[in-house]
Amino acid sequence: MLAIIGGTGLYKIDELDIKDSIEVSTPFGMPSANAVKGNYKGRDVLFLPRHGNAHQLLPSEINYKANIWALKSLGATQIIGVSAVGSLREEIRPGDLSIPSQYFDFVKGNREKSFFGNGLVAHVSTANPICHSMADDIVKAANTIDIPIHQGQSYAGVDGPRLGTRVESQFLRESCQCDLVGMTNVPEVFLAREAQISYCTITIATDYDCWKDDPADHVTVEKVIQRFGESLAKAQKVLMAYLLTNTTDCVDGCRSSLASAILSPRDLLNEEQSRLLELLEK
């Protein structure tokens, strides 16, 4: 089942025929909001607003583990996130859609980034952190409705909530060779991989961050909200088109990422650890 995680400005999807609003309690606390289960032309879909129903959560306050756990427990095998980002490349213009394929973790705060620890040891490969099969299917769906999407970019994940300095923007662009910068995809993308869920993000470029010389090009909250809102309809059209496509099987091993990742002997796991693994391995 596909789950959609909505970012800034995307708190519901009007096209869905809503069947249920589900409160999910997880071992890691409550998710950002109730998960909504809906249907679009015969296909079941889950939806969760990343920042809460009223955008009450900062990027560092989001319970990413609870969000991914909740969607996994409700049967999600695929996740498409929608996120606002700053563009670090001239060719990715404000309003453009992109699907990043690589992630640079520049988050320095105390976000919990793994389901593992406390006696349960695993090391999941994230050399290719997204599902390329799903990304290709999203692009094909977008092509059927003549909406262009950049593909193959690198996303730098930062803490926020402040907007970056020029030297940080230039560092991410030049030294780290990143193309996009955002506050919410890390650790979401990595937790999805640990949960054996295929994951992609459709990003909406709202600005050029602040690497350019002209201050008029620098990011402001006003620009983020305005440009995200203007382009959100495009992203939703792509999502609906994707829901109507015949999707291809994952070739990146997303759905079997734990097969050789777990080091802890299973016969030594306690009941809580065993329950954790049981859900992640579904």
Image (spheres, helix red, strand yellow):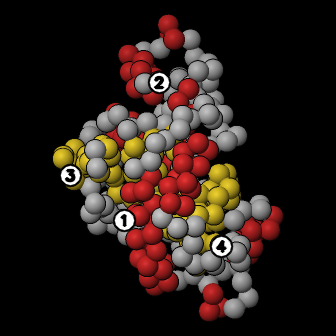
Looking at the rendered structure, the number of numbered marks drawn on it comes to: 4
Q: Give the CA distance from mark 4 to mark 3.
A: 34 Å
Q: Which mark is residue 18?
A: 3
The N terminus, quarter of image? top left
Question: How far is disc 1 from disc 2 in space, using C-alphas?
Answer: 30 Å
* Residue 233, horizontal then vertical, whole percent: 40, 71
Q: Is residue 90 visible?
A: yes
What is the residue that sits farthest to the right in this orientation? 175
At horizontal 22% and vertical 44% (from top left) the residue drawn is 22
Q: Which disc number belongs to residue 26?
A: none
Q: Looking at the image, is mark 2 or mark 3 nearer the viewer?
A: 3
- The residue positioned 72% from the left and 83% from the top of the image is 212
Residue under label 1, please give it: 10
- State the CA–CA distance, disc 2 to disc 4: 37 Å
Q: Residue at x 62, y 34 (%)?
A: 251
Instruction: Give, as a three-letter code, the residue at label 2.
Output: Glu
Task: Please identify the quarter of the rendering in which residue 180 is found.
Answer: bottom right
Q: Which residue is mark 2?
A: 281
Image location (x, y in percent) of residue 234? 45, 69
Q: Which residue is mark 4?
A: 92
Q: Residue at x 50, y 55 (%)?
A: 141
Q: Quadrant of the C terminus?
A: top left
Q: Amino acid at mark 4?
A: Ile
Identity of the amino acid at label 1?
Leu
Q: Label 4: few (<14), some or many (≥20) within 10 Å? A: many
Left or right placement of residue 218 versus residue 14 in this view: right
